[in-house]
């Protein structure tokens, strides 16, 4: 149930005002009875009765307005909490479920909003409306109310028949929607290559294919839902307006109930059947979002608490007869490697050897299939949580957010202006910061920065983090020789700790900057 994510006082206020709004139908039915009775037997003041009716309607209009405001506020609060939990899981979990992709965070969670959160609130309101109407009907004529009530339960038969079909159609749509989102992301990133090779029409046909599949699945789900709702509604009206009306009129002709009371019960009966139809429709809405909710429920209570990283001194790391199994591929091939504090080590190997895999082993992201991994003489059993706090990273394609220089370096952590300027100077960003300022917006993927500036930004980030070991993954392979040499000088001279770089192509001049060169394919 999504409403558990709403604050308790808002839900209490919502229930109170939903109950007040539900009484509107009772008030209108009561006034209807009074007007009919007055028409048959004029007693009292018609003007007074009219003023009473108008005043009551205005009062209920105000109550309904507050109800709608609370409803919108609860929907917002629940949606934010759902997105907060899903986002925290994606960020904190090293083994995040790949199914929680861009499609899930946008389209899927929007379906939860429109087909689950709102539906659950509607069930609350419709339930209160039914209780209020039924209680009023019992007070007016219990046996006539029971007849209408029994008739209103009949639609549940159809709900049980069609519910599984709606859920199956919903799962099919969720899968196709995810495929469409992935295909659209591919198309956007591939557009320039499509124009280069003159295959725009082919790529267009591909995305159109996934669009059609997604829309067909959506139409099938909507069809199942709408047909079920219409059949339930029609069946409900047949049950409630056939036999019950005939029996009610019979009671009127036999003088067992007044015409006004019969009209009141008839009016209230709409609030027996309509809320029940509404509840069944809401249940159908909830069923359409069940596959999405099941995915979210698996991560909703993920423990995102992290123990603050301890500032542990780094002495050495060692791999002994290490190997990794990725699917059917076995990498590293019994690798032995030892790196001591302060060393600047270059690890060379051809493309495809598994250099990036090796770095992921060091930070604890990929476990060993065999062999041992130790830091400071301690075997690492827990992987990521034990290992990653030792390392900073510089990559071939830096991770850069569409934000300021300052945010990209500090990543939201507190740092003084003096600290930021110092690391920028050491990383070779001094002139850029002097010209543009720390609040300079670098653009999407750092598009306003040169390739070298992007690398230097990651170096500044590593310097500020004060991790003892800097890992560099083909950090300069995309740069020209002059800039590559400058970046290596910055890393090897200005980073105070240990440096481990993997590369498959590097100049002889840059190779001499390292303390040690290890050819991994010869180990």
Image (spheres, rainbow, N blue to C red):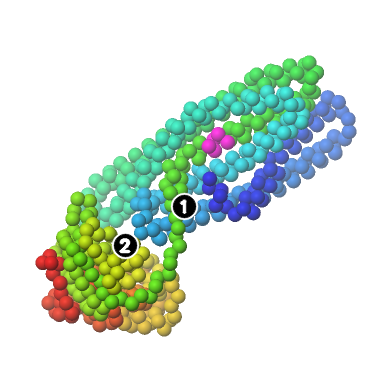
- Camera-nearest label, 2 or 1: 2
Measure the C-alpha gap from mark 2 to mark 1: 27 Å
Measured along the vertical axis of the image, is residue 207 above or below residue 77? Answer: above
Where's residue 161, x and y in %? Answer: 48, 27
Q: Could you tell me if residue 363 is visible in this image? A: no
Query: For this rendering, which residue is in front, 428 or 2?
Result: 2
User: Which residue is denoted by mark 1 in the rendering?
Assistant: 300
What kind of element bears circle 2?
loop
What kind of element bears circle 1?
loop
Give the residue at the far right of this rendering: 44
- Write the residue at 43% across / 72% down: 413
- Report which quarter residue 521 is drawn in: bottom left
Where's residue 369, x and y in %? Answer: 23, 57
- Report which quarter residue 473 is drawn in: bottom left
Measured along the vertical axis of the image, is residue 446 above or below residue 249? Answer: below
Based on the picture, tell me whether residue 186 belongs to the magenta stretch: no
Q: Could you tell me if residue 512 is visible in this image? A: yes
- Write the residue at 15% across / 80% down: 512
In the image, taking residue 412 as reference, residue 133 lies left or right, namely right
The mark tally for this picture is 2
Where's residue 18, x and y in %? Answer: 66, 44
In the rendered image, which quarter contains the C terminus?
bottom left
Q: Which residues are magenta?
A: 279-283
**First in residue order: circle 2 vs circle 1:** 1
**Neighbours of disc 1 within 10 Å: few (<14), some (14-19), many (20+):** some
Q: Which mark is residue 89?
A: none
In the image, taking residue 57 as reference, residue 321 lies left or right, namely left
Where's residue 343, x and y in %? Answer: 22, 78
- Write the residue at 65% across / 46% down: 15
- Write the residue at 18% across / 55% down: 330
In the image, taking residue 462 as reference, residue 338 lies left or right, namely left
User: Which residue is denoted by mark 2 in the rendering?
Assistant: 381
């Amino acid at each position: 149930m999504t409403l558990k994510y709403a604050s308790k006082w808002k839900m209490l206020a919502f229930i109170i005002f939903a109950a007040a709004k539900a009484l509107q139908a009772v008030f209108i039915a009561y006034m209807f009875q009074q007007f009919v009775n007055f028409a048959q037997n004029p007693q009292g003041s018609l003007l007074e009765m009219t003023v009473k009716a108008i005043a009551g309607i205005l009062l209920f209009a105000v109550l309904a307005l507050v109800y709608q405001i609370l409803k919108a506020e609860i929907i917002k609060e629940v949606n934010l909490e759902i997105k907060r939990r899903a986002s925290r899981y994606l960020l904190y979990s090293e083994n995040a479920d790949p199914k929680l992709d861009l499609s899930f965070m946008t389209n899927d969670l929007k379906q939860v909003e429109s087909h689950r959160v709102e539906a659950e609130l509607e069930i609350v309101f419709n339930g209160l409306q039914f209780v209020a109407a039924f209680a009023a009907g019992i007070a007016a004529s219990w046996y006539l109310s029971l007849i209408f009530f029994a008739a209103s339960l009949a639609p549940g038969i159809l709900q049980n028949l069609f519910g599984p079909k709606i859920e199956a159609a919903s799962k099919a749509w969720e899968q196709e929607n995810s495929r469409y989102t992935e295909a659209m992301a591919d198309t956007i990133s591939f557009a320039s290559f499509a124009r280069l090779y003159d295959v725009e029409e082919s790529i267009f046909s591909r995305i159109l294919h996934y669009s059609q599949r997604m829309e067909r699945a959506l139409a099938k789900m909507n069809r199942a839902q709408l047909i079920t709702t219409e059949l339930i509604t029609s069946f409900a009206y047949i049950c409630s307006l056939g036999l019950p009306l005939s029996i009610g009129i019979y009671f009127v002709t036999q003088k067992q109930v007044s015409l006004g009371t019969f009209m009141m019960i008839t009016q209230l009966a709409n609030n027996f059947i309509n809320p029940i139809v509404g509840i069944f429709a809401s249940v159908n809405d909830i069923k359409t979002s069940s596959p999405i909710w099941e995915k979210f429920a698996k991560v909703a209570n993920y423990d995102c608490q992290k123990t603050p990283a301890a500032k542990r001194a780094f002495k050495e790391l060692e791999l002994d007869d290490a190997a990794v199994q990725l699917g059917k591929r076995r990498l590293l091939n019994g690798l032995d490697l030892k790196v001591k504090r302060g060393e600047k080590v270059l690890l060379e190997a051809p493309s495809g050897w598994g250099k990036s895999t090796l770095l992921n082993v060091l930070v604890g992201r990929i476990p060993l299939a065999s062999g041992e991994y130790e830091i400071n003489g301690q075997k690492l059993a827990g992987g990521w949580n034990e290992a990653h706090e030792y390392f900073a990273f510089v990559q071939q394609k830096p991770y850069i957010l569409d934000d300021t220089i300052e945010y990209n370096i500090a990543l939201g952590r507190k740092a003084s202006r003096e600290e930021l300027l110092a690391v920028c100077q050491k990383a070779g960003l001094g002139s850029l910061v002097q010209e543009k300022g720390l609040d300079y917006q670098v653009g999407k993927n750092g598009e306003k920065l040169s390739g070298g500036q992007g690398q230097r930004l990651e170096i500044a980030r590593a310097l500020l983090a004060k991790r003892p070991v800097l890992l560099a993954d083909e950090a300069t392979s995309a740069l020209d020789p002059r800039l590559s040499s400058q970046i290596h000088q910055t890393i090897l001279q200005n980073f105070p700790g240990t440096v481990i770089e993997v590369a498959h192509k590097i100049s002889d001049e840059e190779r001499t900057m390292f303390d040690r060169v290890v050819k991994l394919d010869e180990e």
